[in-house]
Amino acid sequence: MSDSTGDLAFEYDATAIGRSVALHADCFEWMSRCPENSIHAIVTDPPYGVKEFDHDQLAKRANGKGGIWRIPPSFDGHVRSPLPRFTALDAKERERLRAFFREWSVLVTRALRPGGHVFLATNAFVSQLVFDAVIEGGLEFRGELIRLVRTLRGGDRPKNAEEEFPGVCSMARGCYEPWGIFRKPMGSLKVSDCLREWQTGGLRRYSNELPFEDVIESERTPQREREIADHPSLKPQSLMRRLVWAALPLGEGVVVDPFMGSGSTVAAAEAVGVRAIGVERFREYYDLGIRAIPKLAAVRVPELDTVVGSVVEPALFRR
């Protein structure tokens, strides 16, 4: 793929999907090769660099044995997707997490254009640690996006003592998902200067009357999307299309997802009419993404109709 950022596919196994491209590569290696100031924005849900996506833990999840993955119960006729148990991290693993994000942030800060934004999914249990590490790596903290969504995290009675303490929950039931919003420092540039020189620096409004907001009422990923892409961390298109829209303030440039998974970010970019690069190191998920991205991009998302109305080009948000 060639554009103003240059050819960023290098010699990796790559697949063009619409105006975007997916790469089978390790994002640390790939970003170390990217020219300085070459990426406009990043929107990603990382694996946290601890152990939930290590090969042995993936095998345990696939076999229903759990490992670090909590296997939630089946109820209402629905089988819930496994969730990583971040409360199981010990001190050594938390330091590994910090080191992972510090190193990642250093590479991102180098590759991003000045003023380029990063939307980084996390969770309430580790967000403070992750955000601190990302700031140490060089990015500016620009706030937090709150995705209001009822998850299956927390709210459980004390393990193996449910009957003894029926009126107690070990931690609060999760009703939101925090996303860190970061930006590469602009130096002495003002936002207007950065927009003119780098096409970055701010966030794209939904319309003249409606700015991008930092609280989004969301949903768990719909079954129709899970049937397309069976990935444990799949985010809904109703959320991802908003984020990739906002990440490019002028609607120009390339959004990168360095942890592509099954391709929800790339699909969202295709749906709203911008280009994306997805990088995935696991072959299984890379192949899944290649199949899933065109189908996810074609999903109609009625929930977004009320957001964009008739002011923003509605065809970009719904198919």
Image (cartoon, helix red, strand yellow):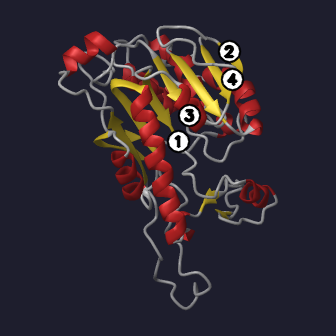
The type of residue carrying mark 3 is Pro
Which comes sooner in the sequence, label 2 or label 4? 2
Q: Identify the residue position indicated by label 4 in the image.
A: 295
Between the C-alphas of marks 2 and 3, the distance is 16 Å
Secondary structure of the residue carrying numbered label 3: loop
Q: Identify the residue position indicated by label 1 in the image.
A: 45
Q: Identify the residue position indicated by label 3 in the image.
A: 258
The type of residue carrying mark 1 is Asp
The type of residue carrying mark 2 is Ala
Secondary structure of the residue carrying numbered label 4: helix
Q: Which numbered disc, 2 or 4, marks the residue closer to the eye?
A: 2
In the drawing, does residue 176 fall left or right of residue 263? left
Residue drawn 72% across and 37% down? 285
Residue extending farthest right:
63
Q: Are marks 2 and 1 in contact (CB under 8 Å)?
A: no
Vertical placement of residue 171 versus 178, above or below: below
